[in-house]
């Protein structure tokens, strides 16, 4: 449980930093990679916790479920921001291509 608690703290910190970090910064890619790794580790630890016949602390399990929901919401916010940036970037590239095409036809 201690390992999961420490991982939850680290995951929360990475999400907090990632929310504040612009996608254009190099650190952002490292944070996303770290986030993916931490989420994978957490999935393993939660699976082990759920398969442990000795685990009977319903409050602790509920707390883990609540954290999962919180982490999911925060991750979705980050993902939506990144997707919006990609959409704007793609739209801008298309507009540039249209202008280049118009200019080359002159």
Image (tube, grey):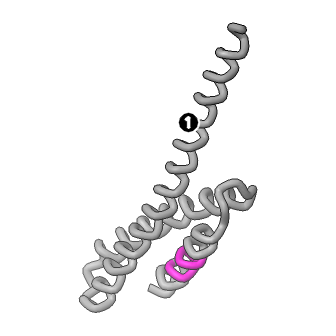
Find the residue positioned furthest to the front: 106
- The percent position of residue 52, horizontal first and vertical second, equals 30, 77
Image location of residue 63, percent across then percent down? 34, 86
Front one among 39 and 32: 32
Residue at disc 1, secondary structure: helix
What residue do we see at 68% from left, 8% from top?
105
Q: Which range of residues does the magenta coloring cover?
A: 8-13
Residue 86, above or below 32:
above
Location of the C terminus (image quadrant): top right
**Residue plotted at (61% across, 67% down):** 18
| Residue 45 included in the magenta stretch of the image | no
The tally of labels here is 1
Q: Residue at x 59, y 78 (%)?
A: 13
Against 28, residue 4 (above or below) is below
Tell me the quarter of the picture where residue 1 sits.
bottom left
11 magenta-colored: yes
Residue 51: x and y, percent? 29, 72
Which residue is found at the position 33% from the left and 89% from the top? Answer: 60
């Amino acid at each position: 449980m201690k390992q999961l608690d420490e991982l939850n703290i680290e995951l929360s910190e990475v999400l907090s930093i990632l929310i504040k970090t612009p996608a254009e910064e190099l650190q952002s890619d490292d944070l996303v990679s770290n986030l993916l790794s931490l989420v994978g580790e957490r999935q393993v630890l939660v699976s082990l916790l759920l398969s442990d016949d000795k685990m009977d602390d319903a409050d602790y399990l509920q707390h883990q479920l609540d954290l999962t929901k919180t982490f999911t919401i925060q991750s979705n916010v980050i993902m939506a921001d990144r997707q919006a940036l990609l959409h704007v970037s793609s739209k801008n590239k298309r507009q540039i291509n249209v202008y280049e095409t118009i200019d080359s036809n002159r």
